[in-house]
Image (cartoon, helix red, strand yellow):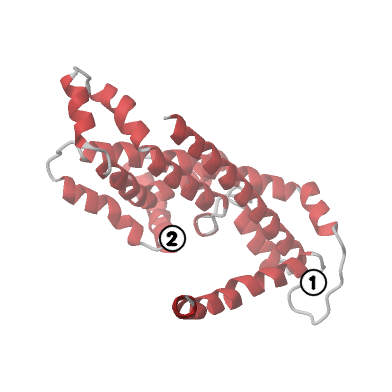
Amino acid sequence: MNNINSARWKYELICVSFLLPALLIFGFVVVVPFFQGINIAFTNWNGMSQEMTYNGLNNFFNLFRDIQVRGALNNTLLYTVLTALGVNLFAMFIAVGLNEHVLGARFLKSAMFLPIITSLVIAAFIWLRVYGEVFPVNFRMASPLTSIPTVIPGIALVCLWRDTGLAMVIYNAGLQSIPAELREAAEIDGANTLQVFRRITFPMLAPAFTTAVTLWLGYGLKVFDYPYTLKGPGRSSQTIGVFVYDTFFSHNKAGYGQMAALVMLVIVVIITGMTTNLLRRREVEL
């Protein structure tokens, strides 16, 4: 018995030893800076001096009185709603459509996935050129980045173009897990395409829907690259992520910017956590 326990301990120790390098890197890159950031958030540090003066909860309370924070939060929420809904709806219907024995479905799936290999900044620069030259010349339309009401929808369109292919892969994997017998039985009973989708396909896609929605909620709430590159008039394209960057590096308010980053982290965790729980319960009901 002792020999068995000893062998088990040795096996578990070997398994942990393989994880140790990754855990050490994670600790130095994520955990240590995170706790250092918590300390900085309660100071008025400018990011460069050797001295830091603690100011308690002043940074926290100032965030709720800052009009610029409210504007950035509104922009962030609007972008998140547009992208989370748009990406998932487009990806779901494209995945379902391409699984209906469409001619060239494999090529179309590959073509839809190609934009995701483009980096966020490069995708933003591509659409900056499209908005600046293609829209006015080919469509006789002004760039959406020149008007305050259309800046965020214009930035969200870039996300739809780039990310829909990745979400489509998630939904396509969910479709492959649906037993063909369920669909065939429904068709034999006289169900049309819409009824099959509503009664069988969509409920069976609930796990994929939960995963994709949660992912793009998180992406949207912490978005930085698109709005930082595709700047609109004034602060019309400023999100919470851009606000944190500008406050920390451009205005040399490291303590205030770090507090904003911590509040943003809490918001992301709460919203994504609540959404995941609600959708998981919905999966059980379906």
Residue 162 in the image, given as x and y percentages of width and height: 37, 52
Tell me the residue that label 2 is attached to.
120
Name the residue rendered at 43%, 60% in the picture. 120
The residue closer to the viewer here, 222 or 246, is 222
Name the residue rendered at 29%, 47% in the picture. 173
Query: Mark 2 packing: few (<14 Cα in 10 Å), some, or many (20+)?
Result: some
Q: Secondary structure at mark 2?
A: helix
The answer to which of marks 2 and 1 sits earlier in the sequence is 1
Q: For the view shown, which residue lies furthest in the left direction?
A: 103
Tag 2: residue type?
A: Leu
Q: How many marks?
A: 2
Tag 1: residue type?
A: Trp
Query: Mark 1 packing: few (<14 Cα in 10 Å), some, or many (20+)?
Result: many
Picture layout, residue 202 above or below residue 210: above
The residue closer to the viewer here, 226 or 206, is 206
Residue 245 in the image, given as x and y percentages of width and height: 64, 63
Quadrant for the C terminus in the image = top left
Name the residue rendered at 71%, 72% in the picture. 36
Q: Is residue 111 left or right of residue 263?
A: left
Residue 142, by quadrant, is: top left
Picture layout, residue 57 above or below residue 97: below
Tags 2 and 1 in contact by the CB under 8 Å rule?
no
Q: Is residue 108 visible?
A: yes
Looking at the rendered structure, which numbered label has been put on residue 139? none
Picture layout, residue 257 above or below residue 9: above
How far is the residue under mark 2 from the one under mark 1?
31 Å
Name the residue rendered at 74%, 60% in the picture. 259
Looking at the rendered structure, which numbered label has been put on residue 45? 1
Residue 118 in the image, given as x and y percentages of width and height: 36, 62
The residue closer to the viewer here, 257 or 142, is 257
